[in-house]
Amino acid sequence: MAEFDATSGRRVLVTGGAGYIGSHTCLELLQAGHHVTVLDNLCNSSLESLKRVESLAGRSLTFMQGDIRDFELLRRVLVGPNNECPAFDAVVHFAGLKAVGESVSQPLAYFDNNLSGTVCLLRAMTEAGVKTLVFSSSATVYGDPASVPISEDFPRSATNPYGRSKLVIEDMLADLYRSDPAWRIARLRYFNPVGAHVSGLIGEDPSGAPNNLMPYVSQVAIGRREYLQVFGGDYPTPDGTGVRDYIHVADLASGHLAAIRALWQADSQTGCLLTVNLGTGVGVSVLDLVKAFERASGRPVPYRIVARRAGDVAACYANPVLAQTLLGWRTQRNLADMCADAWRWQSRNPHGYRQAAATGGA
Ligand code: NAD
Ligand code: UFG
């Protein structure tokens, strides 16, 4: 009997595919020969990202503007126009709100969007018989870890509503798998995604002042902001600043491909529930990143050390070995690549996708 070919030609629904990580993953999926449908309500993204994905891939995808909380829409999409049921071989689920601070001031918006939205998606998938799912979890589920590097069996906790939404969804998925072992589920815990596609055509496009370090540093280097505030210089780390595991978004995208392949290869009777860290295993301090960015961009990044940011932990980096063992995946790009690619994206698109949308070009 011919071996099942999981390497191309499968149909994948990507929720939140117009966003930062989703757009890079759509590109990987198209380049691997899969048929991609994106469902996104564009609440934190623009269609321009997907136009650029298509031009990079030289192939088109299907876009549907819609909300994952719209059960009827999801059911229709998942069973297909002719009720061919199931119309997809897998779902990659990125759609969600992700700003930690906003989740503290608007917890219900986060529970509604992330939790109700995911319940709605899972109900529609169940009805359509699509039981292969890759879910975007986060290193945030480790809370303040007792030690580093962090392995998947470390205790989990939530320190804010965003983190709680990830934790509850992880548990929902485990319950679902226990109830029906036909499910094949990967819970991917991302560490700190940064960087952009090497072409400089797609990248991270935060609206307003960035919350995260790399986009903030990029905007200082390009002159949109005067200086970086380094949150805390007195952590118990080698230089006193916070240490994180920055992972290139293109490596993260290839991690999703590896996870989908692993799910497709799993037994469809007994299913599987995979939980893996996607990180490099390398701890990088805020000042390490600033210096690497200055080297990559040739621009100064002025900074001032200020008080710690509430809720931050001193150090958070992955033990990445399980992903290597279970998915045969490891990161390929280093901090210099992350900074060079973030800078290329920032310098070619100083106002992100908005400028291109306004002028009709990159
Ligand atoms: P993003 O905001 O760029 O992408 C999310 C996409 O989902 C956006 O295009 C948005 O328009 C869409 N969306 C949101 N709510 C929706 C809804 N109800 N219906 C349809 N579409 C909706 O974020 P990202 O950085 O690409 O993150 C993707 C996923 O990865 C999120 O679930 C996020 O929580 C998770 N994650 C991100 C990070 C990070 O640092 N970027 C870290 C860990 C986990
Ligand atoms: N930092 C600064 N100045 C800034 C922004 C950040 O010094 O302007 C520091 C932070 O204090 C921290 C490090 O840079 O030490 C990284 O901060 P980010 O905000 O970039 O990332 P976090 O580690 O706080 O959190 C990110 C996402 C979370 C996700 C987590 C793990 O925002 O949603 O990574 O994946 F859960």
Image: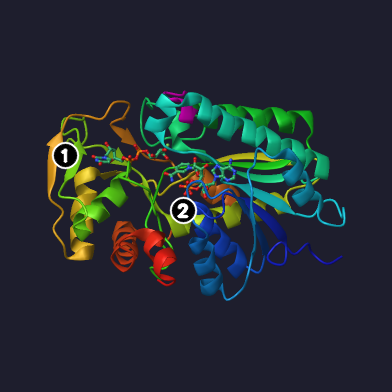
Give amino acid for label 1.
Answer: Asp
Q: Is residue 214 visible?
A: yes
In the rendered structure, find residue 307 and report the number of the disc placed on it: none
In three-dimensional space, the C-alpha distance between marks 2 and 1, rounded to whole angstroms, equals 30 Å
Q: Residue at image x 31%, y 30%?
A: 312
Q: Residue at image x 63%, y 49%?
A: 92
Q: Is mark 2 within 8 Å of ligand 1?
A: yes
* Local SS, label 2: helix
Left or right of 328, for residue 13: right
In the rendered structure, find residue 20 and report the number of the disc placed on it: 2
Q: Is residue 156 visible?
A: no
Measuring from the top left, give residue 12's x and y in whole percent. Answer: 68, 56
Q: Does the magenta stretch include residue 145?
A: no
Tell me whether circle 2 and circle 1 mark residues in contact (CB < 8 Å): no
Labels 2 and 1: the sequence-earlier one? 2
* Nearer-the-camera pick, 51 or 143: 51
Left or right of 304, for residue 159: right
Judged by depth in the image, the label closer to the viewer, 2 or 1, is 2
Left or right of 138, for residue 7: right
Q: How crowded is mark 1: few (under 14 residues within 10 Å), some or many (20 or more)?
A: some
Measuring from the top left, give residue 68's x and y in whole percent. Answer: 64, 42
Give amino acid for label 2.
Answer: Tyr
Kindly indicate the quadrant of the structure image that contains residue 8.
bottom right
* Local SS, label 1: loop
Quadrant housing the C terminus: bottom left
Q: Give the range drawn in magenta.
A: 154-163
Left or right of 174, for residue 41: left
Q: Residue at image x 37%, y 48%?
A: 207
Q: Name the residue under label 1.
A: 239
Q: Is the magenta stretch mostly helix, strand or loop?
A: loop
Measuring from the top left, give residue 266's x and y in whole percent. Answer: 73, 48
